[in-house]
Image (cartoon, rainbow, N blue to C red):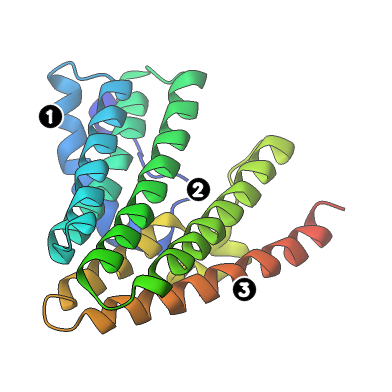
Amino acid sequence: MNKFRLPLAKSSDGPISLLLNRPLSHAMSGPLAGAGVTPNQATLLSLAIGLLGAVGYATGTWWVGGLLVQFSSVFAGVDGEIARRTGASSKYGDFLDTVADRFVEYATFVGLGVGLARTTDLEEWAWPLAAFAIGGSFMLASASEKYRSVMHENYPKRQLEPAFAYLVGGRDARVFYLAAASVAAMWRVEVLVATVVVMTALVHLNYFVRVLILRGRMA
């Protein structure tokens, strides 16, 4: 089989990743792998794009922030695809990919907090909202990573929590809905704020549901 035609999706991919992100990242990873781009270089490029998106949020340019962070989410799949295409997978590459994803998510909500505090009348709510959004995302991600370290497999969110997988269970879904709300914020910033509030509440609910699901699965 041609190494550039290998199955490139992962068992942990969420629905948004499979339906939207993977087709786009597939189209990019082949040429980049052929050009000699390494998985770690692709990870750092995804990180840079995500940080630019966070700057967009911090300046109140919501649609720029949303689209760049969404593109970073799409590009986050390229590093692993290059690794699988070329056989260049490494433990450090897996580690770097994970921490880069978390840092982009962290920077995104910090940027969002800065932007809401600077450009709206939500100063007193901006930072608590950003803090809860960051905390919920990190708790949910830590549950998945702990499952992977203990069970030696990716957390199968599509199998165990299909409804949450379409809503907030994976970074792919959270970023996509945030990006859509960010574009809508060009006309009404309240749409973005409401989206973050609802997503944050669902992320915390998902976290507790995940703990209960894994209590039975890992007993």
Which amino acid does the dot numbered 3 rest on?
Leu
Q: Secondary structure at mark 3?
A: helix
Q: Amino acid at mark 1?
A: Pro
Residue 42 appears at what percent x and percent y? 26, 28
For the residues labelled 3 and 1, the Cα–Cα distance comes to 40 Å
Nearer-N-terminus badge (2/3)? 2
Amino acid type indicated by mark 2: Ser
**74 horizontally vs 218: left or right:** left
Picture disc at residue 11? 2
Q: CA distance from mark 1 to mark 2?
A: 24 Å
> In the image as oriented, which residue stretches furthest toward the right?
219
Q: Residue at x 12, y 75 (%)?
A: 186
Q: Toward the viewer: 104 or 123?
A: 123
Question: Which label is found at residue 205?
Answer: 3
Q: What's the residue at 18%, 31% (across, down)?
A: 30
Considering only vertical position in the picture, is 40 above or below 49? above
Give the mark, 1 or 2, whose residue is nearer the N terminus: 2
Residue 206 falls in image quadrant? bottom right
* Tally of numbered discs: 3
Q: Which mark is residue 180?
A: none
Camera-side mark, 3 or 1: 3
Number of other residues with Cα within 10 Å of mark 2, as a class: few under 14, some 14 to 19, many 20 or more = few
Q: Quadrant of residue 52?
A: top left
Q: Are marks 2 and 3 in contact (CB under 8 Å)?
A: no
Assess whether mark 2 and mark 1 are in contact (beta carbons under 8 angstroms): no
Q: Kindly tell me whether residue 201 is visible in this rendering.
A: yes
8 vs 179, nearest the viewer:
179
- Residue position marked by numbered label 1 in the rendering: 31
Frontmost of labels 2 and 3 is 3
Secondary structure found at label 2: loop
Q: Percent x, y for residue 204? A: 60, 69
Q: Residue at x 21, y 34 (%)?
A: 29
